[in-house]
Image (cartoon, rainbow, N blue to C red):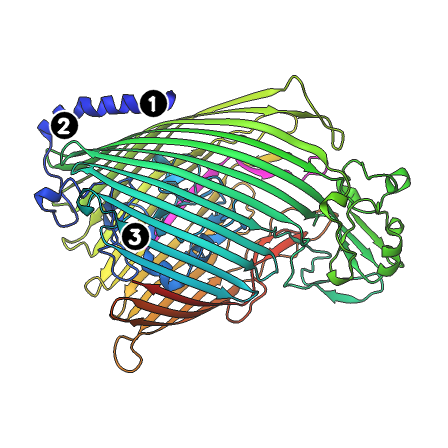
Amino acid sequence: MNAIRNLACTLAFALGVVPAAHAQSISPASTTDAPAKDETIQLSVFEVTSSKDVGYLSTNAAEVTRMNTAIEDIPMNVTVFNQQFIEDLLATDSSDLLAYDSSSMKTTENDGFMARGSASVGTNFLNGFAQTSGFGSQPLANIERVEVIRGPAAILYGAGGYGGTYNRITKQPQPRWFTSARVVASDHSSYRGEVDYNQPLPVFGGKTLLFRANGIYDRGYTWFGQRRQEDGLALSLAWQIAKPTKLIIDYFYNWKESQASWETPVHNGDPYGIVTGDGTYHKFPRKIAWISPDDYRRNLRRVYSTDFRHAFSDSLQFRSQFQFENRAQNNVETQALSDGLVILKDAALMPRQWRSRPQNTDNYRLRNELVWQARTGPLNHRLLLGQGWIQVYDTNTIMRSSQNYGGLTGAKLAGDGRIADASASAKYFTYPNLSYAEFLANPRLAGFNPNLLLPINLLDRGLETPTPAVDARSPLYLDTSTRTYTSNQDLYANDVFSFWHDRFYVMAGVRQSHYARKTIAFASGTFPNKVLLESKPTTYQTADATTHSVGVVWHANAAKTLSLYANLNSSFSPVYTLQPDGSELKPEEGNQKEVGARFSLLRGRISGLVTWFDIMQDNVAQKDTTPGRTDYYVQVSGQHSSGTEVSVNGRITDDWLVIGGFSDTDARNELTGVAKDLSPRFRFTLFNKYNFSRGKLKGLGLSLGTIYTGERDLTNATIHNEPNWGPLPDYWRVDTIVSYKRKARRCTYNLSFKVTNLFDNRDIYYVGSWYRYTIDAGRVWQAVAGIRF
């Protein structure tokens, strides 16, 4: 009912202002060619097409201002990775693509990134709506472009995202028939198929109803040996109801099965190996995953969305978007406990447990927007008024076994293993005279309960006893059972206006947000003796915020080949995490200032941007590493980052395309002087592709990608007094692609061969703390065959 009431209010408002707005409005100034009169309504202010993209250069952005705007007129650092770049890179997911964004640094396997020295990055947006995270890297098969907005963008994207916002924009039905498909084969017996089918439906003259479908089928293994499966289906229907009215209906189904990427422990500051009790140094295997064959993480995401657009006139247009997302997760897996370590005479062991974690999330999102294009005196306005509504319902349960860290004594060594969690000081043990063979014969000699899962052999997994089947393992006990309801209500306005022959552009906006969360905790007690409560405690949290943004662009000449811009904006993020004692955390806040210069050289063949930024964050939540403060957080103020970013996009010749960037980011706490963990000072990316368009080599394409990441400080977290072994080393990654394209009478064939991480660099870390780490894959090859007709 609230959603219907909100929509009705917005429609009433829109209808109420039509007569007054129409009386004052004029045809708005446009950065693109004016359409013919009978096309004016069809070319919506909300639509951006790729028809004017040249190579990797896109001139307009769809979602940065929530309306079609020339990038050169936006006072922000914006990068668009368009469809040609996605196809030339042979990227299949967001992680592949964003590796070539110089300001982004991967920090998790679930599309977690750090940007501009901040881990608060909105990395998972789809058509302007935030998606539920924790689902692995998002597929690109149904994605036409990805828009990267660096810095806070709270006015139009809501809370958080201090470092940046990454918005994936889906492929839309087109008014012509075509089909494309490709098959990707890679090492480790991996195969992936993708198809893209577009068809104007033969009704209403064949131009009114358009249909598009994208499909994914993927089976195989990662470089580390983890099982990987994925099925996907994206359906889109566009109905041009009348010249001023359009409705787009989308459905996306995505099922994935994967296995975890657990961290590797570090002992005595050495991430490469360990000394066992007999004094022998052993190297850790790098190409390995600390999993069991039966482990699985099954995730199902279903997204239904509608996008209704109506033009009351050339100058007044309305848009209403609704999205429902359901995410169902079911994880049944052994969990490597990298905070524990047991050293024997000839082996090193990492404890583990097993767990079951079902989770279900329902998201309802509604957004209504009205755009008024008009002139008031010398000003050409594009004013956007918006209202947003979000409801999130999340049910989360965790069942897990007792933890088997070793060092147990007495009665804990017997029975089914129903024991309390070990303290931080009881997770490291040495038995220098006990061999691994003797341990397997009697695990109690190292203080392990044999009825719980036995530990991982870090040096040779082939020596381990088989992991018991699920129904033969030790019992699971209740650990967590919660249900949360989260609600957001937003009102926002953003005006982009120009004057002096469109040489000056000003963007100013404000957003008022109300956040509320209700959390119901069903479990009480201490593990493993927690019970479900009849009278369930409920906590309520609310927060309100007003954020703002203002920016200006000055085009130094009429051709807009040199422009300067500046912006000031703020952002806000409620922190819903409760401390174990029930106390609340303060909301995070951030403020940014930014200046930049855009340039275009050689008649538009080369375009670039140089930016300087400064961001200050307060109340940033971090894990409390103080002994005895497990699961507590501390909030750090004065988190400051500043730096310079350079991006270049070029068509050096008609056959040579280039895209790249450089970032210099100094991120540290102003109060303590401590550098931000995992944030590199320097990062550089460059991707080149040369197409042979004539002669005997016609159709051949050669691509070279290079990525450099500088040193990064480790996360300041330790266990059993492990020392700081950082910083993480700097590294280069080199990717190569050889492709061949042949056009036949009715179709185009593509053959490609890609090698990622050509020189097999196995020191590319994306997680690192004083006592554990996770690395990225070594060298991986892909063979791709595609067809389009």
Residue 198 - label: 3
Q: Residue at x 89, y 52 (%)?
A: 442
In this rendering, position of residue 148 left or right of residue 60: right
Asked whether residue 615 is drawn in magenta, I would say yes
Residue placed most toward the observer, 542 or 748: 748
Secondary structure of the residue carrying numbered label 2: helix
In front of the other: 416 or 72: 416
Pointer 1: what residue? 4
Residue tagged by mark 2?
Answer: 21
Q: Which amino acid type corresponds to the residue marked 2 in the rendered image?
A: Ala
Residue at 54% over, 44% down? 299
CA gap between label 1 and label 2 equals 25 Å
Image location (x, y in percent) of residue 139: 44, 51
- The circle on residue 63 is none
Q: Which residues are magenta?
A: 610-629
Q: Give yes or no for residue 582 being in the magenta stretch.
A: no
312 to 503, vertically: above or below: above
